[in-house]
Image (cartoon, rainbow, N blue to C red):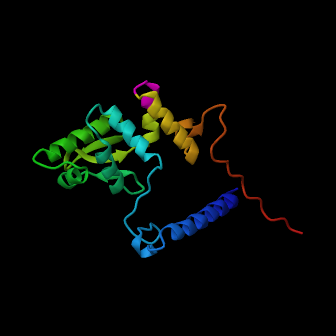
Amino acid sequence: MNATRTNLTSKIGIRQLELRHQLWPQFADADLWLRNVRNGFTTVPRTLPIIFQIMDCLSKGKPVSAAYFDLWCRAFDECFVVLNKPKDMAFNSGFTGQRAEQTWQKRISILNNLGFINTQPGPSGPMSYALILNPYKVIKAHHQKKAIPAEFYNTLLVRAVEIGANDLTEENGEPLPGRPPTVPKRHPVQPPRRN
């Protein structure tokens, strides 16, 4: 199954590359930001635009998505960020002026209260560290409390299914009863037969 998916992805990639060269022949690879040859990238869910809309809807007129995205871009695979540069983080989140840091801290507090992050105290004050939690699971919990408009949640659900993300259809890391897993389970490798 994995080999088929890899071949399909490669075939699609080759076709996309051919189409890109036909549509934009004036641009070379050096003109593009290719993640396989550049440093400084992060992995994001393909559903992030709708996740941002849901976050900003939940934050009731105080948009938090830019602050969240800055945290996401600072995190590595450990999903945690040291909050020791509030001025820089506020600016990168789109907050400027005299109250930039204060506004940023309020947005971080809202993200913490909504459950998208979990902050811990330390040398930089009550919010010195932030753990970034799975946004799908946080949104699912808000959906169960009826805190998210149906059109937002349904849009996220449909897009997640399209891309094969099963976070919304899992419970405690397992598929919900009566629903097949999105990703097939791996079978143990059989030892080679001896003749």
Residue, x 69% and y 61% (percent of image)? Answer: 3
Question: Splitting the image into 4 quarters, where does residue 33 fall?
Answer: bottom left
Report the front residue among 78 and 46: 46
**Residue 143 falls within the magenta-colored stretch:** yes
Left or right for 156, reference 2:
left
The extreme top residue here reads 146
The extreme left residue here reads 98
What range of the chain is rendered magenta? 141-147
Residue, x 29% and y 41% (percent of image)? Answer: 64
Report the front residue among 27 and 98: 27
Assign the C terminus to one quadrant of the image: bottom right
Question: Splitting the image into 4 quarters, where does residue 103 fall?
Answer: top left
**Residue 71 falls within the magenta-colored stretch:** no
Task: Using the image, determine if residue 157 lies above or below residue 14.
Answer: above
Residue, x 70% and y 56% (percent of image)? Answer: 1
Residue, x 34% and y 42% (percent of image)? Answer: 117
Residue 70 in percent (x, y) is at 31, 52
Is there any visible trace of residue 172 in the rendered image?
Answer: no
Residue 41 in percent (x, y) is at 40, 62
Residue 164 in percent (x, y) is at 58, 46
Task: Using the image, determine if residue 1 lies above or below residue 144.
Answer: below
Task: Using the image, determine if residue 192 lies above or below residue 95.
Answer: below
